[in-house]
Amino acid sequence: MDALGLHLILELKECRPDLLDDMEFVQQTLLNAAEATGATIIGKTFHKFAPQGVTGVVAIAESHVCIHTWPEYGYAAADIFTCGENFSPHAAAALIAEAFECKDPHFQEVTRGILTQTAKTEA
């Protein structure tokens, strides 16, 4: 069987709250992680919530890197989806966790778009 993509789900617990609430820092962290690990950045959008929290997405040619933060809990939910071979989602996840000084990171890997040989030839 072949798969179209890999989806990493990041549970980032015990992060530095001030970093999670700094929109510029969050944005730069995701951009740096994508760029440093081989992604081709094609767009981005971020939003700062009141009184706290940030959400954002970096669109990459290989798919996306997304995040939503809860500074009040020291927690961020992020995901990285890739269908490209030149981008390292595991390395990007490690860079993101490190940037937020995460003391309790958990990554879950999901294979997406599992196709049989028959499905590939019919498409």
Image (cartoon, grey):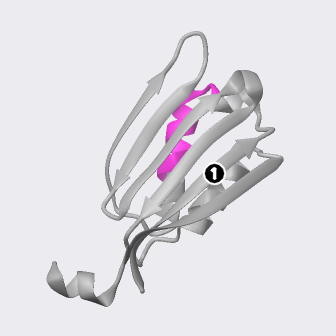
The foreground one among 114 and 102 is: 114
The foreground one among 42 and 106 is: 106
Q: Is residue 29 magenta?
A: yes
Q: Quadrant of the N terminus?
A: bottom left
- Give the total number of marks visible in the rendering: 1
Q: Is residue 17 magenta?
A: no
Q: Residue at x 35, y 63 (%)?
A: 40
Q: Residue at x 75, y 31 (%)?
A: 74
Majority SS type along the magenta span: helix
Q: Position of residue 31 (x, y in %)?
A: 47, 49
Disc 1, SS: strand
Tell me where residue 20 sits by quadrant.
top right
When the figure is inspected, residue 59 is found, relative to residue 72, above or below; the finding is below
Indicate the amino acid at tag 1.
Leu
Q: Residues within 10 Å of mark 1 (few under 14, many from 20)?
A: many
Left or right side of 5 for 11: right
The foreground one among 35 and 14 is: 14
Tell me where residue 18 sits by quadrant.
top right
What is the magenta range? 21-31
Tell me the residue that label 1 is attached to: 10
Q: Quadrant of the C terminus?
A: bottom left
